Amino acid sequence: MVTKSAMFAALVVCSWSAAADTITIRADEWLPYNGGTRLNPPGYMIEMAQAIAKDNGHEIDYRNMAWDDALAAARAGRIDCVVGAYISDAEGFAFPKASWGKSGNDFWVLADSKWRYEGVDSLASVRLAIAEGYSYGDEIDAWIKANRADPERIVVVPVIGRASARMIARLVGRQADVMVEDANVLAYALEQAKMEQGRIVSAGNSGAPEDVYIACTPAHPRGRQWADMFDAGTQSLRSSGRLKEILARYNLADWQN
């Protein structure tokens, strides 16, 4: 005879197992890496995650969340993973061995600007637009922290929706002199805005591009499990040609090449 307590325990186990098959991913919108909650388009990192999860019998639950909040939720184990993370963003997280792309921060100005980036000291003469909660490397982050309270130097843009589009608006509206953004993200945003070529130009970069990853929770063993699964899955997507197909939808090439 099955007791009520045994039936309840079985239901709890079944409920936990069902939940464990759904991998929760959160991040703010950062196309072409990852899109909005409505997945229109998903972004190539979300397409990678979906393909790998499906191959392993899992599903992805992806939604937008402010970047700082997403990192905090993953660190606490309330969600499983974030996408578009530098190793410096998510210290202590479970990372796959293989990165999911390269990202470098460039400085962008209107075409009529004579300003060019010549190290952090050159930022003292301009108003720099940044996305709230983003990391731009140790040197730039330190400069931003030291000057954040000065609106004549730092223009902080909320990451609700597409932060890159908001920074472009600040630049075009002359509310900022310079913005800092990943080259792939800016190119995608300019294409979506149908802005004429050459209106916004690069004024230099802050260093060589860095690897970006999917990063999973350090608070639970499943974080390491998911990171290892995504690592093996990346190799499978690459060798099968499916990664090339995914990237082609965003006019991107495999960063490993």
Image (spheres, rainbow, N blue to C red):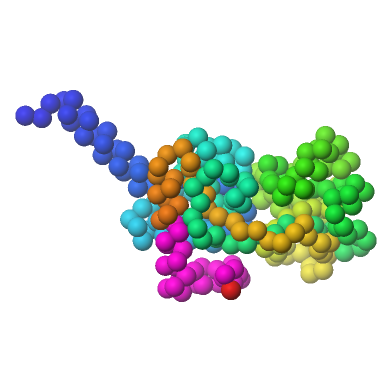
Direction from residue 123 to residue 84 in the image, left or right: left
Direction from residue 59 to residue 68 in the image, left or right: right
Residue at 92%, 48% (x, y): give it.
Answer: 125
Direction from residue 5 to residue 169 in the image, left or right: right
**Segment tinted magenta in the rendering:** 230-256
Can the viewer see residue 140? yes
Position of residue 63 relative to residue 78, above or below, is below
Image x and y of residue 224, in percent:
43, 48
Q: Name the main secondary structure of what is drawn in magenta.
A: helix
Tell me which corner region of the image, top left, top right, bottom left or bottom right, holds residue 183: bottom right
Can the viewer see residue 23? no
Nearest the camera: 209 or 45?
209
Nearest the camera: 254 or 140?
140
Magenta span includes 232: yes
Image x and y of residue 72, in percent:
56, 37
Farthest residue toward the left? 1
Q: Quadrant of the N terminus?
A: top left
Number of numbered discs overlaid on the protein picture: 0
Residue at 59%, 68% (x, y): give it.
Answer: 255
Residue at 45%, 52% (x, y): give it.
Answer: 227
Image x and y of residue 219, in percent:
46, 37
